[in-house]
Image: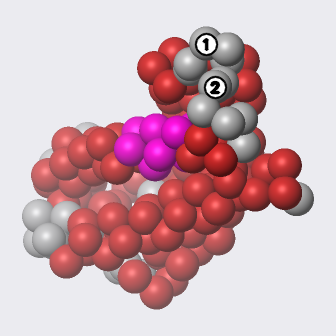
Amino acid sequence: MKKIGIEFKWGIIFALITLLWMWLEKSMGLHGENIQRHATLTNIFAVPAIIVYVLALLGKRKHYYGGKMSWVQGFIAGLIVTAVVAVLTPLTQYITHTFISPGYFENAIQFAVESGKMSQQQAVDYFNLKSYIIQSLLGAVVMGVVTSAIVAVFVKRSK
C-alpha cells in the first residue's frame, strides 16, 4: 500500500472534490432553474481536476521518487489515480443523485424534451443513474489517461 499511498490519497481527494463540485453546481441552480447552462459550465470542473493530477504527480515525485521522476513513472502514477477515481465513480454518482441533487434527472429530462433536444424516451434513457455511472466511468478513464499523459510531461524531472 505504501507504494501507491500517494495515488490512493489523491484519488479519494478527487472524489471528494467531485462531490463538492456537484454541491456547488446544485447551489448555483445548474441542476434546476439554470439547467440550460449546466452542459457548458460543468466543463469548468476540468480546472480542479487537472490541479488534483498535478498535485498528485508532484507529490509522487517529491515524496516517493526523491525529486526525480521520469515521464513513465509519472504516467503510471496518474493511471493509478485514475483507477482509484474510476472505482469511486459509481459511489460519487450515487451520492450526487441520491443526496446532493435528487431532482437532477427529472429536471434534465424536462429541459431536454421542452427544448427539443431529445424525445421523452431518449431523455429518459440518457438521464438516469445507470447511464450516468457508465458515462462517468468511461469519462474518468479516458480523461484520466489523457490528463496523466500530459501532466507527466510537465512534472517529470531528469535523473
Check disc 1 and report its element: helix, strand or loop. loop
Which amino acid does the dot numbered 2 rest on? Answer: Lys
Which dot marks residue 68? 2
Q: Which mark is residue 2?
A: none
Q: 63 or 74: nearer the eye?
A: 63
Taking the image as drawn, is residue 74 in sight?
yes
Q: 96 left or right of 94?
A: left
Q: Is residue 44 above or below residue 30?
A: above
Determine the residue located farthest toward the right in the rendered image.
1
Tell me if residue 45 comes above or below residue 70 in the rendering.
below
Q: Please say if the residues under marks 1 and 2 sit with CB atoms less than 8 Å apart.
A: yes
Range of residues picked out in magenta: 50-58
Query: In the image shown, does 80 or 27 lie closer to the viewer?
Result: 80
Q: Quadrant of the N terminus?
A: bottom right
Within 10 Å of disc 1 (Cα), the crowding (few <14, some 14-19, many 20+) is: few
Q: Is residue 144 left or right of residue 102?
A: right
Q: Quadrant of residue 89?
A: bottom right
Whether residue 81 is visible to the viewer of this picture, yes or no, is: no
Residue identifier under label 1? 158
**What residue lies at 40% left-to-right and 82% top-to-bottom?**
100
**Disc on the earlier residue, 1 or 2:** 2
Q: Nearer the viewer, residue 88 or 66?
A: 66
Pointer 2: residues within 10 angstroms few (<14), some, or many (20+)? some
Residue 76 belongs to the span the image colors magenta: no
**In terms of secondary structure, where does tag 2 sit?**
loop
